[in-house]
């Protein structure tokens, strides 16, 4: 792994750039821009920030990712889960809407960006592997439910707060008598319209003869229609209708500014920044890998750390919030035919133009409509079937999933995620501390040995073959001792024990102690200990100790040779 | 594992009891009692407690262990490391010598006993396996150094305090001008005498013709000689000599009393109690297993949890401190010929008699002599060679050892232990996230496949055999994806990939996703994926999913069959 750390993927794809690719990238950028304007506003609102912050966070990060990212189609910006985590991190010590709140969002982006950059430089991309699939899935599903619940208040035109789903729901129920009917009418209609679009519009468009591509673009652009329509309605109702609107959004490019230095604040945001960085990275890498695989391209996790790190730092320096590669925006970019990260650059230009000239048009946009777009988007994150699937496939995965899901719902995203990762690691360690160990016998007519309990095999009364299906280390070494003690006690005529080491990839100092203890006990019982199929690296390790000199038996290349040679003296085989 | 939870080992050995065993047990008890009197006083002093507490803690626990313990020769009572941990836990919020301090020691014993009992009932004995050998070794060595350092002040007759070795040493250096010469004379002579005894007395006694047993007993009893001699000297010097003595030790049996209830205090002691319980358990089980193996007996870790738990609870209720099975006292018991736990009962009676009648004789015993006995005892805990051994054998073990050792010295026992366990687990997880994966080929004339990089083997241009040496789980699944991608890219003519699954013992949901991704990518490249030597439990798991239905290739019983069948179409083999 001696690749240079700093790579500029733009040097690769830039060289092959031509007019045809340009056309495709421009078209994709146009479609993505139209979709991103409402989405950016919505996720800023979800994070508790002014609407323009969402657009700011969609400009500089797109440029940085286009220069550094290893995925050709990933689209970076505010995404639902990261915005939720941002709100939950900052909400603990700043009022939504306050200047401190916005400062904290910028600091979060800056810090999580710096951490990702550092992880990239240290090539720590592998750390993301410790977030197992069930943990991510449980966390994302629960986040989807929390986000959807948190938006209900905008739909009803009431105030409600809380960290967990239940707190929010309780708060909502208390407010039911205060529901603002015009808001509910607008938000409810938008929600039903978007759900209908999601489910029925594309098939309908296909049925009336439109091409798949056009049908796709139209159904993806439907939220824009909802926004225009509901904005017009609120404009008609007038300013005193009581329907909450986005209101005055300042025009202009993102400001270049450094968040204030406040040691206590930065320190409090350290852990949330790390979690936001890691979760964003994992989400982004999964999306990137899925899309790359479709075109037989690859992405490089360590390069992604650098690209996402730089994107977040740029977001923090231009008044934005934490960002990452989002699923829906990237899929739209991919489906719209983006060929290179230049599509991202063009999207950034599109959003910059929107920030300069389009914000007045957003004045009457009802918050309820944004809430409806968020709810429809995040409900697709909730995966119910995975509970049944993991229950059938592997119980530890089911428990990791359920605990992450449950604790995220009950206590919020940080607790859920940390508990999920800890539990999945603990379950793995527990399993590895009780490895599968089998007594093996020969399959007749082959040189192949299998578990006596699962296959019809030949065994010997005096030669006992034992296979350990795990590397030996401190947590499972004593388990092996116990197994061999018991096996020898149950096979009274045994005079040779052969440890088939085909699955032992390394041995640590604690396991070496155990092997010595095993050998000592076997010797006392007049039984010889042999090894077979010892891997090269393990043999190298053992050669550095005096274990092999003390070994009462031999080391055989294959288990077959061992059994043949040791069994020759007493060849009574039994099936 | 459906054994009944509550066992009384006394019902087993009690049935075989006879006069000969009684004689052996009585003799052993006598020798151990003589040795335990000064040792109990010394470890009480080390823990910062009145001398009699050490004797109290050696009576009830011995009885409880004799009834419940699964080791026949383990001797339970105050031991050096646990006493150090007790002092360090209580020292944070109570003054040594105060009533609160003693209360806290009783609470620690009671709580750690209750935790051990609970762990025993839940059959959590396996948790101790997560303390690796290097971590224990580093922790014990550092504790030995801390204990030895902490006793220097008694030897010099000065005051010095501190948690870490360096704080204590610094404090000592500041006090050097205040050294009390009579104390130093007495303590220094005792120290030199004990060191001489340890090194030279036994060979000398053997040379003059004594039997091994008698020579052993005499050299083990030598501390008693030092105690008697130095006590006489101080008695001669008179009370105003300034040499610190044990002084008035109340006569009488241990009091039966409940520690005071103080919620805040109990809560603060929760974590130390857990660590003391676990460390004591691990030390005790290692000693017990070592001694049991010598007589081909076995001990049961879960039963040991119950026995040590009950012993500690009894210590906490009779004015004692946390206890466990000690190395030196158990070895003496074993060497002296103890056959059953009845020896422990007799020792308890001996110590009860000492508590009733012998305490006045301890009045003039100098603290410096006790300090010397502690120093000589704990210096044997320090293992220097293990650093070199683990460095050669396995680097992760070396780092776990060094970090545990260093942090224990610098920041005390709790920090060192927790850091050591965390680091050793992290290193294991890291290693398992980058499993050994080999491309394998056939060893000519056998049906056996080995790593192409280590053996002269036959391979095919079109059939690629890949063996993974670890179970597949979330942390390493992506690593396998990367390996296969790269291997296929480097072998352009490959049309079949056979995954030799002989070392894959389980597959989790994340790894299943990865296998599906691998299969998808291989299919796109017109390569078939096959599996060979899939273990029974893994096959059962896969059968619950639709992975096998989507599999483009086949599942073969042996890798040899797979290669034979797939290679038949294009049989060009190359070495």
Image (tube, coloured by chain):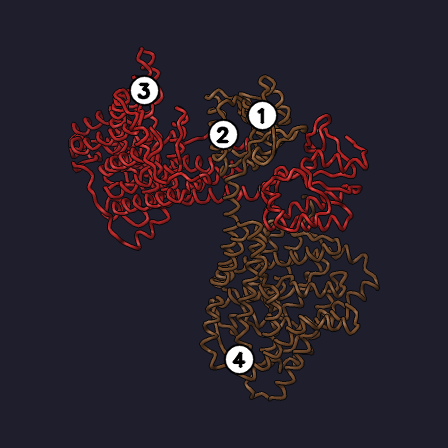
Chain colours: A red, B brown
- In the picture, measured across the screen, residue A433 lies left or right of residue A353, that is right
For residue A11, what is the image quadrant?
top left
Q: Name the residue under label 3.
A: A216
Residue found at the far right of this picture: B19
Q: Which badge, 1 or 4, comes first in the chain's sequence?
A: 4
Identify residue for label 4.
Answer: B157
Q: Could you say whether the residue bearing mark 1 is in a helix, strand or loop?
A: strand
Circle nearer the viewer, 4 or 2: 2
Q: Which of B207 and A524 is in front in this view?
A: B207
Mark 2 — on which chain does it sit? B
Label 4: chain letter: B
Which of labels 2 and 3 is toward the front? 2
C-alpha separation, residue under disc 3 versus residue under disc 4: 88 Å
Do badges 2 and 3 share one subunit? no
Position above or below: A386 against B125: above
Q: Mark 2 points at which residue?
A: B487
Q: Residues within 10 Å of mark 1 (few under 14, many from 20)?
A: few
Gap between marks 4 and 2 measured at Cα: 71 Å
User: What is the C-alpha distance between the residues marked 2 and 1?
Assistant: 17 Å
Report x, y in % for residue A185: 26, 28
Q: Write down the quadrant of residue A442 in the picture.
A: top right
Which residue is nearer to you in this view: B350 or A481?
A: A481
């Amino acid at each position: 792994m001696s690749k240079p750390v700093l790579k500029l993927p733009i040097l690769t794809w830039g060289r092959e750039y031509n007019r045809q690719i340009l056309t495709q990238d421009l078209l994709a950028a146009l479609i993505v821009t139209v979709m991103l304007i409402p989405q950016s506003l919505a996720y800023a609102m979800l994070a508790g920030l002014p609407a323009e912050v969402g657009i700011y966070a969609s400009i500089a990060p797109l440029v940085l990712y286009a220069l550094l990212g290893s995925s050709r189609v990933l689209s970076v910006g505010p995404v639902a889960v990261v915005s939720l985590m941002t709100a939950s991190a900052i909400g603990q010590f700043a009022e939504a809407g306050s200047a401190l709140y916005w400062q904290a969002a910028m600091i979060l982006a800056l810090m999580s960006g710096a951490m990702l950059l550092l992880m990239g430089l240290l090539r720590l991309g592998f750390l993301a592997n410790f977030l197992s699939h069930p943990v991510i899935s449980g966390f994302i599903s629960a986040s989807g439910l929390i986000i959807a619940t948190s938006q209900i208040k905008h739909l009803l035109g009431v105030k409600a707060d809380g960290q967990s789903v239940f707190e929010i729901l309780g708060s909502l129920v208390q407010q039911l008598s205060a529901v603002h009917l015009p808001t509910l009418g607008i938000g409810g209609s938008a929600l039903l319209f978007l759900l209908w679009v999601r489910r029925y519009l594309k098939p309908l468009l296909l049925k009336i003869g439109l091409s798949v591509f056009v049908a796709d673009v139209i159904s993806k652009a439907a939220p824009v229609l909802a926004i225009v329509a509901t904005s017009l309605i609120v404009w008609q109702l007038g300013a005193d209708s009581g329907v909450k609107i986005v209101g005055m959004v300042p025009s202009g490019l993102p400001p270049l500014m450094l968040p204030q230095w406040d040691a206590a604040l930065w320190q409090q945001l350290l852990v949330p920044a790390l979690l936001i960085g890691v979760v964003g990275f994992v989400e982004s890498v999964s999306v990137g890998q899925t899309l790359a695989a479709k075109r037989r391209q690859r992405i490089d996790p360590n390069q992604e750390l650098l690209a996402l790190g730089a994107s977040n730092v740029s977001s923090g320096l231009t008044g934005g919030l934490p960002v990452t590669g989002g699923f829906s925006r990237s899929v739209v970019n991919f489906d719209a035919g983006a060929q290179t990260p230049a599509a991202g650059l063009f999207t950034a230009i599109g959003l910059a133009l929107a920030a300069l000239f389009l914000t007045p048009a957003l004045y009457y946009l009802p918050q309820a409509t944004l809430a409806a777009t968020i709810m429809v988007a995040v409900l697709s994150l909730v995966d119910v079937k995975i509970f049944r699937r993991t229950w059938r496939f592997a119980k530890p995965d089911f428990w990791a999933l359920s605990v992450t899901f449950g604790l995220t719902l009950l206590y919020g995203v940080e607790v859920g995620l940390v508990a999920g990762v800890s539990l999945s690691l603990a379950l793995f360690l527990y399993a590895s501390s009780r490895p599968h160990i089998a007594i093996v016998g020969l399959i007749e007519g082959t040189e192949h040995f299998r578990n006596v309990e699962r296959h019809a095999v030949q065994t010997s009364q005096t030669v006992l073959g034992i296979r350990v299906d795990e590397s030996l280390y401190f947590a499972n070494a004593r388990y092996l001792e116990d197994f061999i003690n018991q096996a020898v006690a149950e096979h009274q005529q045994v005079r040779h024990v052969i440890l088939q080491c085909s699955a032992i990839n390394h041995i640590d100092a604690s396991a070496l102690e155990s092997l010595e203890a095993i050998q000592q006990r076997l010797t006392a019982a007049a039984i010889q200990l042999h090894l077979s199929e010892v891997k090269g690296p393990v043999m190298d390790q053992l050669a550095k100790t005096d274990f092999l000199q003390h070994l009462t038996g031999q080391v055989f290349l294959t288990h077959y040779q061992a059994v043949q040679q040791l069994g020759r003296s007493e060849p009574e085989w039994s099936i």
